[in-house]
Image: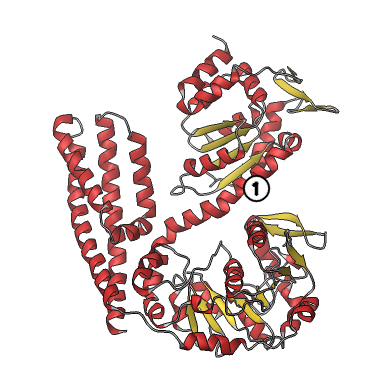
Amino acid sequence: MTFYEKNHQALASQERYVKLAAKLGQIKIKNVEVFPAKNGLPTMRIKLAEHSQLIHSKYDPLKEAATLVNRQAGAEQANFFILMGMGLGYPLFELVKKVGWQKKIVVIEPQLAFFKLALELFDLEKFIKSPDIYFFICAPIDNITNQLTRIIDFSSLREVAIIEHPISKQIMAEYFSPLAEAVRGIFVRTGGNLLTLMLSGADYQMNTLDNLDEILKNPPVKSIFNKFTGKPGFLISAGPSLDKNIHLLKGIGDRAVLICVETAFKTLLANDIKPHIVIAADPLEDNYQHLVGVDASETYLIAEPMTYPAIIHNYRGRKFITTFRDVMMEWLTRFVGDPGFLQAWGSISTMGFDLARKLGCDPIIMVGQDLSFSGNRKYCHNTHWEKTWLYDYERFAPLEDIHEGFITIDKTREATGIDGKSVVTNQQLYAYRKWFEEEVKKTRARCYNATEGGVLEAKGLGVISLKEAVYRFCREPLDVPAVLAECYEKNAPPEKEPLAAALNQVLSEMAEVKERCQSGLKLAVQLGKLKDDLEKSQPVYQNMNKIIDFINQQKDLTPFLIMANQKGRYRFLRFQSSIEGNAASPEILEKASKNYHDFYQSVIKAVDFMRPNFEAALGKVMVS
């Protein structure tokens, strides 16, 4: 049996590759030449329109691949790898040699001819049958990205390494360039969000419960929607370019709406500029310091309840409440009403942009929105971060060196700035740029970038100086404080009785679920002892599944339990998927004993974590 026959048979035996195996029989290889390299291994060149291009080294293709993998395979903690361009397979061989067979590897090769040649030249059966290696050959980009979200195990994901075969990237740029952006977007957007939920989802929910008294007594942000239709709105972020033109914001508060992110608040106050609105949504304690000790008497806070509780509780000014429509807030709005949805996508400035849209502002003018490390700095001056760095790190080091030191911690990349010059950014900031590009297209209001630095450009986004923006758009008087005050003072608190009853119901369901899970732990141990007796083990297994059904049927508790137990639930679902369709056996029952036991424990842990917070929330409702 030839290598090709053996490999083709392996492909046809794997459900996920059946269609690929069928495609291979239809392809005729043209314009590709395979010949021996100097060391005797096969190498390859492809004939392009104007010249021929080597795909691998004509001297030692394996050594070349080893160099590529060692350079791009990432740190030792990486456990998910994406290989973009495999050619005849050398990069894949070296990657497996380096990281082993237990790591997840996604192989993407748009040239079906290259893959067929690899099948003819090498024994790839073990690679094809490996449950941890996934081949996407001549696959549409949308199909790859959709499948990736199913393949990635976010509960165990540590770090992702993307390995780009340089020649493949060069000659197939129209495929690999958008693919690379799409793949990176998955990990910045989906991966980051889901992994964050797994690690911190319960904390976010508890923040919302801790802020329940603030939700009940403060007005909804939707009460100010469309109150500034056709009026200029400035979204002020804390990018390093803010230092260039911040002085131009002074004195325009009576002619425009000034919205700032929390990081920029102290910078504005230090320059005697009092924004009308500051926005907050970060659930972490570090961001509390942006608002500590400030004169907030003239600035309204708009906060999402998952915000770190001290930020909302200790804020000295007036507040409005918004929602990102997470699980907890969707449940609470049934009883307290909809406070008004604001979109947010990773960066607090995205929330600010959506707020400006919903206020009706036109134009929307962005300032300090570098989305890059302009001038080798992370932020503008006078932020809380800068003062912290000076105190905690290098008090006597030049400030510029401190900024640059923190930038080097990030995974940076080069980008072209709005002035045409090269500037340093990172993957996350560049993803935010993509978000703004898309959202500006959807925005009816005129949008301008008056940052005077950074990388933010988009179709429909005017790039102007802040001086020009102030001159063109800030000509008519606008009493922003009066409008906000009128909306604030009209607030009518919701009735508390329905919410109190619902909280009591959740607490009751918690008690029942915990009791069932404690019984489940005993059943899981019993199943492990009966694994070799399929007849006696069957009713035990059935009772364990009844407990799972009971957990999932709790009307009020289940959504919170899913969020608070993301990691445990995800692992359990993956186990269930792995045994689906398989008949009971001692091996499966042994695995079931462990996985059900672990899941019951994770549910009990989640319930014990949530219960005190729900009890405290009920107390707040009763005394509010």
Which residue is farthest left? 536
Residue 156, x across and y down, in percent: 45, 47
Residue at numbered disc 1: 181
Question: As drawn, is 531 to the left or to the right of 414?
Answer: left
In what element is the residue under mark 1? helix
Q: Quadrant of residue 355?
A: bottom right
Question: As drawn, is 157 to the left or to the right of 171?
Answer: left
Quadrant where the image shows the C terminus? bottom left
Residue 288, x across and y down, in percent: 51, 77
Seen from the viewer's position, the closer of residues 226 and 220 is: 226
Residue count near mark 1 (Cα–Cα under 10 Å), binned few <14, some 14–19, many ≥20:
some
Q: Residue at x 24, y 30 (%)?
A: 586
Identity of the amino acid at label 1?
Answer: Glu
Residue 98, x across and y down, in percent: 58, 35
Q: Quadrant of residue 177?
A: top right
Residue 307, x across and y down, in percent: 47, 72
Q: Is 197 rendered above or below residue 253?
A: above
Q: Is 612 rendered above or below residue 64?
A: below
Q: Residue at x 38, y 58 (%)?
A: 563
Q: Is 277 rendered above or below residue 542?
A: below
